[in-house]
Amino acid sequence: MELKRLFFPGAAAGLALVLWLAWLWQPERQVRLHTGSLLKAVERRKWSKVDALLADSYADRWGHDKAFVLGGLRQVFGGFVFLTIEHREAGSDLRAGRSVEQVKISGQGNLVAQFVVTRVNGLAEPFTFQWRRRDGGPWAWELVSVDHPSLNPGEMPEL
């Protein structure tokens, strides 16, 4: 008799879980969540998390690959004593895996850190993060490229 009383609440809880996961795993939501996770990982300097979010085939228009980006991020953001990265969505095409984000940085650090804060905060246009879903489930996304229209290849410093 007790089993019958628990069946409907258990079924309702199971259905609620399935609906929540279907909502959570929508591509638009995953791209938004992964972009936030990437920027939070950079802010906290959790390089293993950044590494896990970057595709092995990462490539951008400046000719940088995954290894270069990871090394550059470590070098540049390692100069911060305090770091906060804020972002807001700016016209993303989330179904296509493209997150367009206005990024603002605040923090204290060495001269390179202060240059980064000034340069990033002076950019009027947003950054574009291109994601793709990899094998392994609806939650498995990886960053394949980052772009910004105002940062020309000749302006990118070699680290």
Image (cartoon, grey):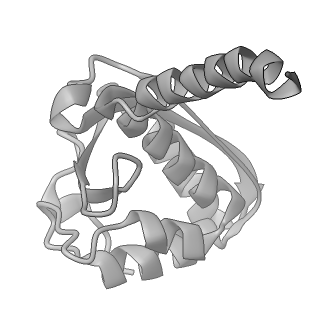
Residue 27 image-quadrant placement = top left
Q: In the figure, is residue 100 to the left or right of 52?
A: left
Confirm whether residue 120 shows in the render. Answer: yes
Q: In which quarter of the image is the C terminus?
A: bottom left
- Viewer-side residue, 159 vs 44: 44
Nearer to us in this view, 40 or 159: 40
Question: Residue at 17% across / 68% down in the picture?
Answer: 59
Q: Which residue is depicted at the point 20% across and 25% down?
A: 93
The residue drawn where x is 53% and y is 55% is 115
Screen quadrant of the N terminus: top right
Residue 117 lies, in percent from the top left, at 57, 47
Task: Spot the residue most to the front.
Answer: 1
Image x and y of residue 34, in percent: 45, 45
Q: Is residue 153 above or below residue 16?
A: below
Q: Can residue 126 be seen in this view?
A: no
Between 108 and 12, the residue placed more toward the observer is: 12
Q: Is residue 19 left or right of residue 128?
A: right
- Could you say where residue 104 lies in the image, as x and y percent from the top left? 54, 34
Q: How many marks?
A: 0
Q: Is 12 rendered above or below residue 54?
A: above
